[in-house]
Image (spheres, rainbow, N blue to C red):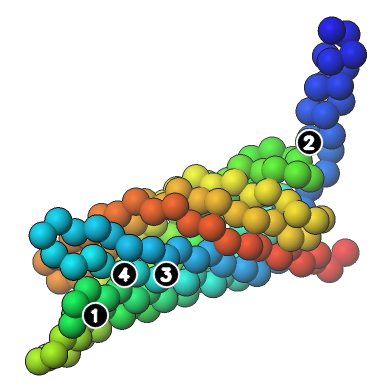
Amino acid sequence: MKKQILFFTLLFSTFLTFSQTNEGDKLVGGTVSFGTQFVQNNNNLLFLNFNPNYGKFILDNITVGAGVGLNFQKQDDNSVTSISLLPFARYYVGNSDVLQFYGEIKGGYIFQRLNNNFTTVNNQGGQFNIGPGAAFFLSENVSFDFQVNYQFVRIEEARNRSLSFNFGFQVYLLGDE
């Protein structure tokens, strides 16, 4: 029993000794999500989201930056393509070289194009995202990220809310020392 307690104490303490999220470091990466939404009495909705981002750590564990959201949806002969510009802030909790949790908030502008067989309509509006995530470090400078993302989009009078599970990679570039 003493060996197990010692092992877990050492394991936990090593999680708190290293950091890839130091002031001046940079963050490059993004997330992707794809799938289908099953619609009762209708054809299924297919979707693909790609969200590249770039940020800089302004303080230890705090990064700010911007991302681009690219989204495509298709159902029958209808499609929706959107692009958004989303400044963000991310706060990392912990100081582990293996796993760090974070919270992220972003908001900005969205442009959307709706197409069907007869018309094309362009719209614009605002988008807001917030959610927790976890960065699992595969190496000192590369993490596999998992994030739960709540999204609110307002275009004209229409409001759309969604919850998604996003996966992605981040590369942490060392700042000038």
Q: Nearer the viewer, mark 2 or mark 4?
A: 4
Question: Within 10 angstroms of label 1, few (less than 14), some, or many (20 or more) residues?
Answer: some
In this rendering, position of residue 141 left or right of residue 166:
right
- How far apart are the alpha carbons under marks 1 and 2? 46 Å
**To which residue does mark 3 refer?**
49
| Whole-percent x, y for residue 83 in the image | 37, 78
Left or right: 2, with 76 as reference point: right
Does residue 32 appear to the left or right of 75 in the view shown? right
Secondary structure of residue under mark 1: strand
Q: Earlier in the sequence, mark 1 or mark 2?
A: 2
The CA distance from mark 2 to mark 4 is 40 Å
Quadrant containing the C terminus is bottom right
Q: Are marks 4 and 1 in contact (CB under 8 Å)?
A: no
Closer to us: mark 3 or mark 2? 3
From this view, report whether residue 68 is shown above or below residue 169.
below
Q: Amino acid at mark 3?
A: Asn
* Res 18 visible: yes
Q: Label 4, label 3: how many angstroms apart (C-alpha)? A: 11 Å
Rendered view: 111 above or below 128: below
Q: Amino acid at mark 1?
A: Ser
Tell me which amino acid carries mark 2. Phe
Q: Which residue is identified by label 2?
A: 15
Q: Residue at x 60, y 54 (%)?
A: 145
The label shown at residue 79 is 1
What residue does disc 4 label? 46
